[in-house]
Amino acid sequence: MAHETGSLSEATALSRKRRAAEKRYRLYGLVAISIGLLMLVILLTTIITKGVTAFQQTYITLDIELLESKLDKKGNRDINDIKKVSTFGYAPLTKNSFEKLISANNLNTALSPKKASKILSKSAASELRNFVINDTSVIGRTISFEFLTNSWIDGYLKGRINRGDIQNSKNVSPEQLDLVDELVKLGIVEKKFNLSFLLGSDASDMRPEAAGFGVSMVGSFYMMLVVLLLSLPVGVAASIYLEEFAPRNWITDIIEVNISNLAAVPSIVFGILGLAVFINFMHLPQSAPFVGGMVLTLMTLPTIIISTRASLKSVPPSIRDAALGVGASKMQTVFHHVLPLAAPGILTGTIIGLAQALGETAPLLLIGMIGYIASNMPSTLLEGLASPNSAMPAQIYEWAKRSDPAFYERAWGGIIILLIFLVTMNTLAVILRRRFERRW
């Protein structure tokens, strides 16, 4: 009996089954990618919506009469006498300005000038004092000065706090919010771009509205400088030796296995190592960017060594053979031919390693970079490296664990800045790789 066969162009049951399976796998891939993109959108949306308000702050503009009888009783403009006037001596000046403000604008409020002035930040008096000390010629004049409002007023105008949240609050009253609403209509209270968030330093729990991220950014910069100066030459030199010069024996095998294992070690282990060696044994200054940079260098070295060795391996053996064939030494072959061709991969691995170190928090917690509040920018390179400071991820962690909602808002704002740094560094790695990459 003859066996009937169909046309070759006709789909069989087996081929239809294979095609159906391929379609399912494509669908699974599309679903997985869609879920990943959705999670990414949700993450970025959450970060931006919660953190973008940190880049705005509520300010109030007041006319302050800088009474000579309060600030310079001798009238000789001696800076030492002026400095003797504490912030308590400046507090009545802001109270007087509120009294005149309420009277001049016929504001309907039952608040006394003293209680009305409570809408100002607790840093208001010190800001005014610093302004006068820097320019004593303003004493005796009436100036227009811009103050921060306290975090509760700021949160109210940003929608973070509503009137129902303050029923039993000791920090703000409904009457103060009524006054703020009137001042907003007059343009005296308004939200502006918060430059001090980008340039300022951390603040105490009593004045979260004055907290800034700038000093922590500088601390991270000095740490990354230490990491770059230590990890790049050491990592590249170790990679060149292991890949080009080291004999293949059990010693190098052990070294390679340990490098691979160190790349997978949790970062907190490097923090414990830094605490034990650099601080407890070597007695280096706690919470200094130099110490933090050395700890992060230990963590970054395996990443740089592995990526550099992969870049060296990617250079075709024919390059080495050609160089050796025309009389170049092994050293000349490596440094004049192999290393320049591997440079794009080395730069990429280094930048990615730095980006990873920039976002690390756990090692910094163990060396004390979470417990120190730096109030001023470092003035010299040595001070920036050796003086106690914080870092961006450590500062974010510190803000996130505080109770005031204003600090929580700033933590989200700090995450936005940190992500901008990380995206910039990774983009730079891609650009450098494409710019210098050569194909054979």
Image (tube, rainbow, N blue to C red):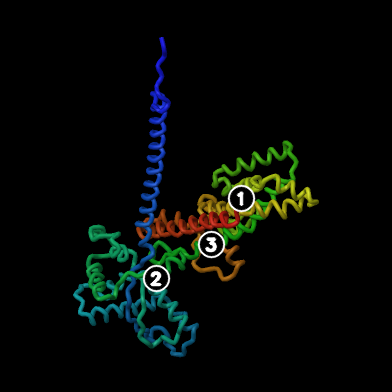
Please tell me in which quadrant of the rendered image residue 33 appears: top left
Question: In the image, is residue 121 above or below residue 328?
Answer: below
- From the top left corner, tell me how far across and down residue 201 is, in percent: 46, 66
Residue nearest the observer in this picture, 354 or 58: 354
Marks 1 and 2 in Cβ contact (< 8 Å): no
Residue nearest the observer in this picture, 256 or 223: 256
Q: CA distance from mark 1 to mark 2?
A: 60 Å
Eye-nearest disc, 1 or 2: 1
Q: Tell me which label, 1 or 2, sits earlier in the chain.
A: 2
Left or right for 360, reference 329: left
Q: How many marks?
A: 3
Marking on residue 439: 1
Residue that badge 2 annotates: 123
* Residue drawn at 71 percent across, 46 percent down: 318
Residue nearest the observer in this picture, 412 or 140: 412
From this viewpoint, which residue is outermost toward the top? 1
Q: CA distance from mark 2 to mark 3?
A: 24 Å
Query: How many other residues sit within 10 Å of disc 1, few (<14), some (14-19) or many (≥20)?
Result: few
Please tell me in which quadrant of the rendered image residue 378 appears: bottom right
Question: In the image, is residue 227 above or below residue 57?
Answer: above
Query: How many other residues sit within 10 Å of disc 2, few (<14), some (14-19) or many (≥20)?
Result: many
- From the top left corner, tell me how far across and down residue 267 is, in percent: 55, 47
Q: In this view of the protein, can residue 206 be seen by the observer?
A: no
Looking at the rendered structure, the kind of residue marked 1 is Arg
Left or right for 374, reference 24: right
* Residue drawn at 40 percent across, 49 percent down: 40
Looking at the rendered structure, the kind of residue marked 2 is Ser
- From the top left corner, tell me how far across and down residue 13 is, in percent: 38, 23
Marking on residue 282: none
Marking on residue 219: 3
Marks 3 and 1 in Cβ contact (< 8 Å): no
Query: How many other residues sit within 10 Å of disc 3, few (<14), some (14-19) or many (≥20)?
Result: many
